C-alpha cells in the first residue's frame, strides 16, 4: 500500500500522480482532495532580490522522517527526497532535488545517496524524464540507472484528431509565472518584430508581468496579457485557442507547460535543454533553439543552476542573436499555414504515442 508523503507544497503534476494512482492501493488519497496545485506567487516571481534560500546556502541532504500516521508496512511515496526509515518510492525531476537543488551538496552526499537508492528500502526510483535517468547514470553509475524508471507526468488532456486550420491568423501563447527566468523579455522583443512582419499574428501572455515591462508590452500590436493566477482549466482553454506555445526558458528540468501544450495540439518553440527534446522534436512539432544562458550543460548543472546566480548572470548576456532566432522561428510558422498545421498534428501524434495514458 502507498502512503503519499504530505508535502505542504504540491504542484499540479504531483497532485495528478496521487489522483491517478489506483485508488485501492492508496492509504491517504484525501491529501489531494479539493486542492489546487501550488504556483509561484506574484511577489516571489517579480522580486528583484537575489538572496539565496537556506538550502542553497547550507549543503543539506533532503531526508524526511517517516510520517507518524503511516502504517508500518506502507511504502512512503515522496518527491525529491529520501525517507530516513522504512520502504519508500522517490519521484524526481532531476537528481539534484535530493539535495535541495544545491550542486555543492551533491558532492558531499553523493555516496550516501547512491547507497540509499540501491538499498532494498528504495522500492522504486521514478524519473520525470529520460534526461533525469541519464543524470542519475552520470552521477551514480549503471546500478542506479538500471533501477530507475521513467514515468512521464499525467495530464488531464485527451487530444483528438485536429481539423485542418484554414484561419490565416497565427496565435502565439506564452505561459509562465516567472517571466524573466522563462525568457519572457526575449519573447516580447521577438513579438514586437513579428507583429510588424506578420500582421495576422496574435500574442497571449499569461504571467506575473513585472511592472518595468508593462509599457513595452502594451506597445505590441494584438498582444493580450493575462494574470498568472488563472485556473488550470482557463489556461488549458487559452491554449486550445492558440496555435503555438513559445517557451524560451533558461531554467527547465522538464517543462510541464510543454507537455500541456502538445496535449492541446500546439506547435512549440522552446529552448534546447535537459528534457525538452523529449517533448519537442525539432522541425517536426516545433523548433528547439539554443539558449544564450542555461542552468544545464547536457545532463549536468552549470554555475547558473541556482536561481539567484542565473538572474545575476542574465544581466550581462547579449540576447540579440537569441531574439533573432525566435523571430525567425515564429515568423516561419506564422507565415506558413501548412507548416503550422503540420506541427500541430505532429504534436498531437507525439503526445498520443509517447505521453498519453489510459487511466
Image (cartoon, rainbow, N blue to C red):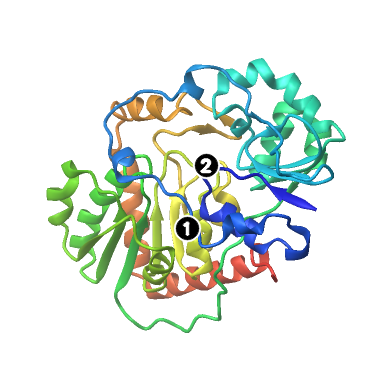
At horizontal 50% and vertical 58% (from top left) the residue drawn is 35
Q: Is residue 155 left or right of residue 224?
A: right
- Count neighbours of disc 2 (C-alpha within 10 A) and say few if under 14, some if 14 to 19, many if 20 or more: many
Q: Is residue 281 visible?
A: no
Of the two numbered discs 2 and 1 on the same chain, state the one appearing first in sequence.
Answer: 1
At horizontal 43% and vertical 25% (from top left) the residue drawn is 53
Residue receiving disc 1: 36
Secondary structure at numbered mark 1? loop
Residue 70, position as x, y percentages in the image: 74, 44
Relative to 280, does residue 345 appear above or below in the rendering?
below
Residue receiving disc 2: 273
At horizontal 65% and vertical 40% (from top left) the residue drawn is 132
At horizontal 17% and vertical 58% (from top left) the residue drawn is 220
- Near-viewer residue (26 or 88): 26
- Distance of label 2 from label 1 (alpha carbons): 28 Å
Q: Is residue 277 left or right of residue 317?
A: right
Secondary structure at numbered mark 2? loop
- Near-viewer residue (77 or 266): 77
Mark 2 or 1, closer to the camera: 1
Residue lying farthest to the right in this orientation: 120
Quadrant of the rendering where the C terminus is positioned = bottom right
Amino acid at each position: 500500500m502507498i502512503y503519499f508523503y504530505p508535502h505542504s507544497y504540491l504542484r499540479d503534476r504531483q497532485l495528478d500522480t496521487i489522483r491517478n494512482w489506483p485508488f485501492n492501493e492508496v492509504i491517504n488519497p484525501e491529501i489531494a482532495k479539493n486542492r489546487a496545485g501550488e504556483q509561484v506567487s506574484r511577489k516571489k516571481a517579480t522580486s528583484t532580490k537575489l538572496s539565496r534560500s537556506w538550502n542553497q546556502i547550507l549543503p543539506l541532504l533532503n531526508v524526511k522522517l517517516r510520517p507518524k500516521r503511516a502504517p508500518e508496512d506502507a511504502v512512503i511515496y515522496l518527491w525529491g527526497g529520501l525517507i530516513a526509515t522504512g520502504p519508500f518510492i522517490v519521484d524526481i525531476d532531476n537528481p539534484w532535488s535530493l539535495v535541495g537543488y544545491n550542486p555543492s551538496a551533491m558532492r558531499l552526499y553523493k555516496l550516501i545517496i547512491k547507497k540509499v537508492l540501491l538499498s532494498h528500502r528504495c522500492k522504486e526510483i521514478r524519473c520525470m524524464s529520460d534526461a533525469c535517468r541519464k543524470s542519475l547514470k552520470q552521477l551514480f553509475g549503471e546500478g542506479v540507472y538500471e533501477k530507475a524508471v521513467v514515468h512521464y507526468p499525467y495530464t488531464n488532456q485527451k487530444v483528438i484528431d485536429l481539423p485542418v486550420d484554414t484561419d490565416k491568423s497565427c496565435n502565439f501563447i506564452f505561459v509562465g509565472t516567472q517571466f524573466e527566468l522563462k525568457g519572457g523579455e526575449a519573447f516580447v522583443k521577438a513579438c514586437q518584430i513579428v507583429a510588424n512582419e506578420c500582421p495576422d499574428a496574435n500574442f497571449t501572455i499569461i504571467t506575473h508581468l513585472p511592472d518595468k515591462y508593462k509599457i513595452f508590452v502594451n506597445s505590441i500590436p494584438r498582444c493580450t496579457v493575462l494574470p498568472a493566477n488563472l485556473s488550470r482549466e482557463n489556461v488549458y482553454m487559452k491554449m486550445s485557442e492558440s496555435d503555438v506555445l513559445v517557451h524560451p526558458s533558461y531554467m527547465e528540468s522538464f517543462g510541464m507547460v510543454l507537455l500541456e501544450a502538445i496535449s492541446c495540439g500546439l506547435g512549440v518553440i522552446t529552448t534546447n535543454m535537459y528534457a525538452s527534446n523529449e517533448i519537442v522534436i525539432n522541425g517536426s512539432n516545433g523548433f528547439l533553439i539554443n539558449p544564450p544562458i542555461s542552468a544545464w550543460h547536457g545532463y549536468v548543472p552549470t554555475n547558473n543552476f541556482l536561481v539567484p546566480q542565473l538572474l545575476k548572470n542574465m544581466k550581462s548576456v547579449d540576447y540579440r542573436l537569441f531574439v533573432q532566432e525566435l523571430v525567425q522561428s515564429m515568423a516561419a510558422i506564422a507565415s506558413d499555414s501548412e507548416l503550422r498545421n503540420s506541427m500541430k498534428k505532429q504534436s498531437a501524434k507525439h503526445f498520443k504515442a509517447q505521453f498519453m495514458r489510459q487511466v
